[in-house]
């Protein structure tokens, strides 16, 4: 019998435009392979009615007091594992926010609980070689304490190791296990009807979705699109998601300066349940990340929908996107290369279809819940026994 405790920023349904619903989907799938799983959160927006009986949602107090909210959240997240609620045997940190990392560290040091830590990327801790402010310095310190305490650390790919090692220089390879990021291939699939917003517009669509920030390479995408639009007029670029208002306004001005503002659409956040329709009907799904992301979930989802993808050759992305087989790879911030790859996929339908079909096959075989979730469960049982 193994009882696992894990964390989630908020419990929400697929109508929400956030990853939290997908993390909950993972935990529900994981519950099928475990005796007990307790999910700690301080926010419940929507509680699914069909939760497995061995999955418990444990809500902690949420006190939004400026300047000390983060410290209170760390305290509230740390108490359940320290008390070994539901006879916790092992801690599993999936999304590596500072409160979760601190809970893993404290429960390991004080309660001697074994743990599994997934380092799914490094973006939260800043760029390598930059001089961090006090907040990112604190985040990096908490990450190091958690990593030193964790029994095992999982990465999505060995390709991530150099980036992760910059922030965790004492990380031992015998502490690491490679377990891919995973998605639901029954939900993300080809052949879905186009979203309502696209049904009356017969232009080709280039679709991107995620956190809109500099690290995602969204400005690079807009600049590349301006080049593509000179050769292919009947195409629009959709950039979905949320980000800082100032940065989004900057991107709109950038598109205007490049002469493509009327062809770059910012629809805002899209409910999770609708995202597969966009991905299954996009002409190209570009992902020009500048690094620090592991193997991005959105990229895997698009590949599962048989969307032809173009992505940066950074982090763990080459694990999923094999150049010329399951997509096209370009160097990060290579605007010309990105534009050429997008243009190729828009013009060569046979290539686009072949890459899309092969991409879905790879996702099903290596990145689906059916393949990955049992590996996570097996590791948690080994660590918790």
Image (cartoon, rainbow, N blue to C red):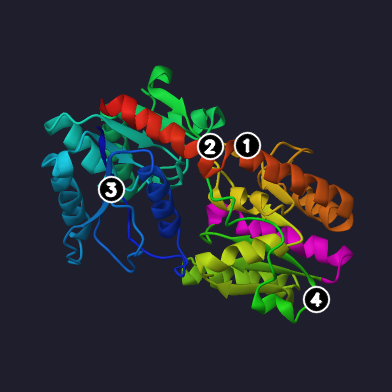
Crowdedness near tag 3: few (<14), some (14–19) or many (≥20) residues, C-alpha within 10 Å: some
Q: On the rendered structure, is 329 left or right of 363?
A: right
Q: Quadrant of residue 90?
A: top left
Query: What x and y, as percent, mark residue 352?
Result: 81, 51
Q: On the rendered structure, is 108 left or right of 160?
A: left
Q: Mark 4 points at which residue?
A: 202
Q: In which quarter of the image is the C terminus?
A: top left
Could you tell me if residue 287 is visible in this image?
Answer: no
Which sits in the foreground, 344 or 48?
48
User: Pointer 2 and pointer 4: residues touching (CB < 8 Å)?
Assistant: no
Q: Quadrant of residue 88?
A: top left
Identified at 16% across, 61% down, the residue is: 61
As measured in the structure, the alpha-carbon distance from the residue carrying label 2 to the one carrying label 1 is 7 Å
Identified at 45% across, 62% down, the residue is: 18
Per the picture, the main secondary structure of the magenta-coloured stretch is helix
Q: Name the residue under label 1.
A: 365
State the SS at label 2.
helix
As measured in the structure, the alpha-carbon distance from the residue carrying label 4 to the one carrying label 1 is 34 Å
Report the magenta residues as a range. Answer: 214-234
Query: What x and y, as percent, mark residue 274?
Result: 57, 68
Sequence-wise, the earlier of marks 2 and 1 is: 1
Identified at 32% across, 69% down, the residue is: 45
State the SS at label 3.
loop
Q: Quadrant of the N terminus?
A: top left
Magenta span contains residue 215: yes
User: Pointer 4 and pointer 1: residues touching (CB < 8 Å)?
Assistant: no
Magenta span contains residue 228: yes
Sequence-wise, the earlier of marks 3 and 4 is: 3
Q: Mark 3 points at which residue?
A: 54
Sequence-wise, the earlier of marks 3 and 2 is: 3
Q: Mark 2 points at which residue?
A: 371
In front of the other: label 2 or label 4? 2
């Amino acid at each position: 019998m193994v009882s696992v405790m894990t964390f989630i920023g908020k419990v929400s349904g697929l109508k929400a435009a956030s990853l939290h619903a997908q993390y909950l989907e993972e935990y529900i799938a994981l519950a099928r392979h475990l005796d007990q799983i307790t999910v700690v959160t301080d926010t419940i927006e929507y509680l699914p009615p069909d939760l497995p009986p061995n999955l418990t949602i444990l809500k902690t107090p949420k006190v939004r007091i400026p300047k000390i909210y983060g410290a209170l959240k760390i305290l509230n997240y740390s108490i359940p594992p320290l008390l070994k609620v539901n006879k916790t045997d092992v801690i599993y940190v999936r999304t590596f926010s500072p409160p979760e990392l601190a809970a893993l560290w404290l429960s390991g040091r004080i309660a001697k609980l074994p743990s599994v830590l997934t380092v799914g990327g490094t973006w939260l801790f800043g760029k390598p070689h930059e001089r961090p402010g006090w907040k990112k310095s604190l985040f990096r310190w908490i990450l190091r304490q958690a990593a030193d305490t964790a029994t095992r650390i999982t990465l999505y790919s060995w390709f991530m190791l150099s980036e992760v090692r910059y922030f965790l220089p004492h990380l031992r390879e015998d502490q690491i296990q490679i377990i891919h990021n995973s998605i639901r291939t029954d939900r993300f699939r080809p052949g879905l009807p186009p979203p309502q917003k696209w049904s009356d517009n017969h232009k080709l669509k280039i679709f991107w979705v995620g956190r809109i920030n500099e690290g995602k390479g969204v400005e690079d995408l807009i600049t590349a699109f301006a080049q593509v639009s000179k050769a292919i007029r009947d195409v629009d670029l959709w950039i979905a998601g949320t980000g800082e208002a100032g940065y989004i306004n900057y991107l709109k001005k950038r598109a205007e300066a490049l002469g493509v503002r009327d062809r770059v659409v910012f629809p805002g956040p899209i409910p999770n349940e609708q995202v597969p329709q966009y991905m299954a009907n996009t002409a190209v799904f570009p992902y020009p990340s500048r690094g620090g992301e592991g193997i991005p979930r959105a990229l895997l989802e698009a590949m599962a929908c048989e969307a032809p993808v173009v992505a940066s050759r950074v982090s763990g992305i080459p694990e999923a996107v094999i150049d010329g087989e399951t997509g096209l790879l370009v160097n990060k911030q290579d605007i010309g290369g990105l534009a050429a790859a997008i243009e190729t996929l828009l013009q060569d339908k046979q290539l686009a279809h072949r890459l899309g079909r092969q991409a879905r096959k790879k996702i099903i075989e290596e990145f689906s819940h059916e393949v990955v979730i049992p590996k996570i469960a097996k590791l948690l049982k080994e660590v918790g026994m």
